[in-house]
Amino acid sequence: MSVAADAAAAPVLATSGLTKRFGGKTGQTAVDAVDLTVPRGAVYGFLGPNGSGKTTTIRMVLGLVRPTAGDVRLLGGRMPDDVATVLPRVGALVEGPGFHPYLSGRANLARLDAADRLADPRTSAQRVDEALDRVDLLGSARKRFRAYSLGMRQRLAIAATLLQPRDLLVLDEPTNGLDPQGTREVRTLIGRLNQEGVTLLVSSHLLSEIEQVCTHLGVMRTGRLVAQGSSADVLGSTRPSAEVTTPDTTRAAEVLAGLGLADVSPTPDGVTATLDGVAPEAVVAALVGAGVAVRGFVVRHATLEDRFIELTGGGFDADE
Amino acid sequence: MPTSDALPAAPADAPEVVEPVDAVGRAEQGARPGAVGAWLRFLRSELRLILGRRRNQVGLAVLAAVPVVIAIAVKVADPTSNGDDATFLNQITGNGFFVALAALALEIGLFLPLAVAVLAGDAVAGEANVGTLRGLLVVPVTRGRLLAVKYVALVLGALLGVVLVAVVGLVAGAVLFGLHPVVTLSGTTLGLGAGLVRLLLVVLYVTAYLAALGALGLFVSTLTEQPMGATVGIIILSTAMWILDSIEQLHWLHPWLLVDHQLALVDLLRDPVYTHDLSLGLLTDLAYVVVFLAAAWARFTSKDVTS
Ligand SMILES: Nc1ncnc2c1ncn2[C@@H]1O[C@H](COP(=O)(O)OP(=O)(O)OP(=O)(O)O)[C@@H](O)[C@H]1O
Ligand SMILES: [Mg+2]
């Protein structure tokens, strides 16, 4: 088997036991034994609440921060040792836009391009303008960065990752500060880039923003990766639940338990339970048949939001 | 740069460079200027960044104003009241050539070090502060390459400042006093051409000192994310060295100070040139460059970039 075919089968990014402790041995563990796997061709949604370690993980992946333990395999190389050979194929936006305030958007991109030892200077101006065009900033290309709005800054940062064709784009909170329309445009852009064959790692703490485009998900919680896999796997592990509104709480709970539903628990005005493959209409029939006064009946399908809260919020036993 | 990476090799018509870029990459875009060209391109961009900054332009104007102020002050003042022997000031009325030397001797104590400190503060701490450092590193620019380009740009910036002072000094001197053959400190007379060569040597000697201070500054710049903090730190170090160097009782310390031999630049105006202190000065410069560039490299290549 050829080396190239081997590389195609391997994940674009794989970390094992990746750990970062800030401030010496006694310091805080920002990232704790993370095994990230981003398959080729994926749009990997990297989720987690503020401070859960997403940016720190990304910094280690890109060689900006040295891991305390563990290693990073990126596009066949080992980070941070292979920065010079691997990163030309990676476009990255880390923790918000960082540009020279008194240079124009175009001049800022031209500077990044000039710093790239593999970039062709003859096509520089054209590639800069194409990148600006992709994020709809061509009209403001000559404005100084300091005069850009938050959304324009964010878009310029995305444009900076598009100066070259890439195998992998790492976008840390790309929709931060964007209005709903801008968010949708970024989502569309992500989808289009993915169709062009680019693998994407997109971090966010706002799930609704990327839920629709992700093929894979990884969820961080206090430095640990608590769930990872294809979107269907991560989301599918919650089943739809039934929510009964009734004054006869005890009786209703007995009926639901009798039907074999799991996680039966009382709410202020009724009972909820997980529908373990039992048809909702059968549940309603059983309740009514048992004389429970049913005032309302709702079947809830878990959204990523619910799953996310479940994984990252209190109650879920993720800390072992 | 050839690497032993497990990646598809470059096509046979690009023999010396193994491209790390695969199918979607840039190897197909035809001949590129190569490593040196790419390096120069980054350096040009860095110089444009430095020179395009309004604050730096104002700084250059201030540097250039000093010789003009000196020339005018000497012209306006009563020539007979000029008894100060310490600098080249009292020779100016006889020969405008000395305006340039007087200006350099005056600015070497504060203005030129300040200029270097400002540029050094911007170099690494400044990029970290505005958040452009991480952007450059993921381009990727390797950390060694970034430091090298930053340092060369810093030295070229210093050279520009020194040359500007000398040239403006010559022009102001020529306009107000005329340029004449140069009487050396040894009493001999050099033709104007030979005198200008001596001035060029002074310019290079001062630049060598600033290059050494720049290495120290670059190291300080890797220690912080606050460019102002770095600049102030460098100024404090530089000024402290001048002060310590003026305290006779600390003579044992003097050989270790970067500034100890810098005023030996006057020896370039002797006939023949008195080289003893000058060579000690250059050796000290070299030692500072080596030590602090190594320190900057060690610090920067192992640093976590969390800005
Ligand atoms: N340079 C640093 N020194 C000390 N602690 C740090 C440093 N950088 C990050 N941390 C800590 O590491 C933890 C993870 O931070 P990180 O920025 O990776 O989170 P995040 O998931 O990106 O959060 P957000 O969604 O807010 O961007 C936080 O508790 C943070 O305080
Ligand atoms: Mg973050």
Image (cartoon, coloured by chain):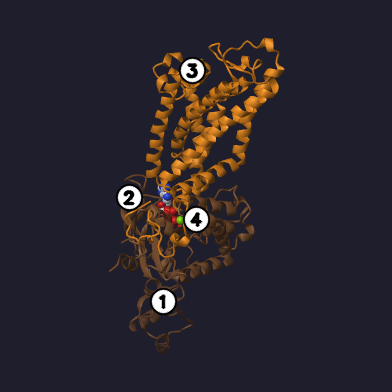
Chain colours: A brown, B orange
| Residue that carries the numbered disc 2 in the rendered image | A68
Label 1, secondary structure: give it. Answer: strand
Are circles 3 and 1 on residues that touch, CB within 8 Å? Answer: no
| Residue that carries the numbered disc 3 in the rendered image | B273
Distance from label 2 to label 1 (Cα)? 44 Å
Tell me if mark 2 has few (under 14), some (14-19) or many (20+) residues whose alpha carbon lies within 10 angstroms of its own. Answer: some
Label 2, secondary structure: give it. Answer: loop
Foreground label between 2 and 1: 2
Distance from label 4 to label 1 (Cα)? 62 Å
Amino acid type for the residue under numbered disc 3: Val
State the residue at coordinates (61%, 38%). Answer: B55
Q: Position of residue B180 (x, y in %)?
A: 64, 18
Q: Is mark 3 within 8 Å of ligand 1?
A: no
Foreground label between 2 and 4: 4
**Subunit bearing disc 4:** A
Above or below: residue A130 compared with residue B48 = below
